[in-house]
Image (cartoon, rainbow, N blue to C red):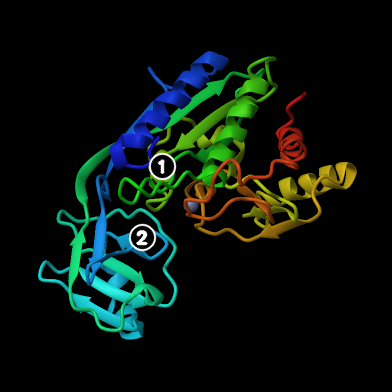
Amino acid sequence: MYGRCASYHGDSIAAAYLADEMKRLGVLPLQVNYFQTYTYNCYSLEGDMSLKINGVELEPYTQYRVYPTARHATPNKLNKASWKKQLKNGTWLIGVSQLDTYSPWVVDKERPDPICIEILETALPKKVKKVVADIPIQYRANYLTRNVVGYVPGAVDTMIVFTAHYDHCGIMGDKVLFPGAHDNASGTAAVMDIARIVSQKQPYYTMVFMLFSGEECGLRGSKYAAENPLIDFNKVKLLCNIDMFCGGDEGLMVFNANSTETKPYFEQLKAINEESRAALNLRPRDNSPNSDHFWFSNYCPSIFILTMGQPYGGYHDPDDTCEGCGLAHYNDYLRMILQLAGIEQ
Ligand SMILES: [Zn+2]
């Protein structure tokens, strides 16, 4: 699915797949269909990509990375660069000792910034004589994207909401794909697994499932969902966000575990763990705008659960694959979350 971002509408293909899965499981749509549509301005990098220095082709991702924004070429970054050159069209080429983590970028203005290409120092020749950069960059104004939302009615209308982002970093030219197995196919799969379990037997609480796009572009989907609510947040007992759920050899981390509204849930999780001894450690953290729970924390008790420790393939990396992901703790951790949500198994 092209890394589930704007490239070749990979996010939309993933959204259609998830909506079909919800339908197959018997999860009901919150509106006429499963989609909550919104837009943002972004870039995509579809097509053949090439960077030649003195006639030598460099390898994308491992030797250079394209950041479609000038935010990677700030005066501070330019000062630190071991080598820099600006092309006639404004593109910055920067020599660095370590390439920055790749993320897709959105922009809140009508015209795109000049782009920035970070090149690993070791891939640069002593003297740069000729640069030929062929970077396929597309600016997408008002790119249409969608959250996928559904619910399973319970015995009461008090709700438990499970959220995860299904999007990832897309592609960087046609040869570099970011699969995003750990981040966050794993959390999306966990939420779908919960949907599968609760759709088999009526749960006590009404269970809501929200799968967001746009997380990697700055928590866009969840922000839209929080500001344009499809449910009454006053009736939400707990919102549980899952983001990066593979590995977990060191246990679980819970963000926003220390607020008055959420602390009891963390304590409950601790008690569950004391009984099951599933997680080696259970670490509470303060709230942070680091995943999709953040926007909802103003309206209802919202926590964010992620695994700590290996194994997983990589982070924002072509190596973040299914094969790299260990799922040894998956069932135990999922059971803890089901118990926290009062779901009988
Ligand atoms: Zn990410």
Secondary structure, mark 1, is: loop
Inspect this view and state whether residue 158 appears: no
Find out if the beta carbon at label 1 lies less than 8 Å from the nearest ligand 1 atom: no
Give the residue at x 23% y 79%.
Answer: 128
The kind of residue tagged 1 is Gly
Give the residue at x 32% y 63%.
Answer: 58
Name the residue that disc number 1 marks: 3
* The N terminus - image quarter: top left
Q: Nearer the viewer, residue 303 or 88?
A: 88
Q: Nearer the viewer, residue 128 or 98?
A: 128
Q: Is label 1 or label 2 in front? A: 2
* The C terminus - image quarter: top right
How crowded is the residue under tag 2: few (<14 C-alpha within 10 Å), some, or many (20+)? some
Determine whether label 1 and label 2 are within 8 Å by CB: no
The kind of residue tagged 2 is Glu
Secondary structure, mark 2, is: loop
Give the x, y percent position of residue 220.
Answer: 38, 47
Give the residue at x 39% y 45%.
Answer: 214
Query: What residue occupies the far left of the structure in this picture?
Result: 88
Name the residue that disc number 2 marks: 59
129 shown above or below 90: below
Give the x, y percent position of residue 74.
Answer: 29, 76
Name the side, left or right, on which 243 lies relative to 343: left
Query: What residue occupies the far front of the structure in this picture?
Result: 55
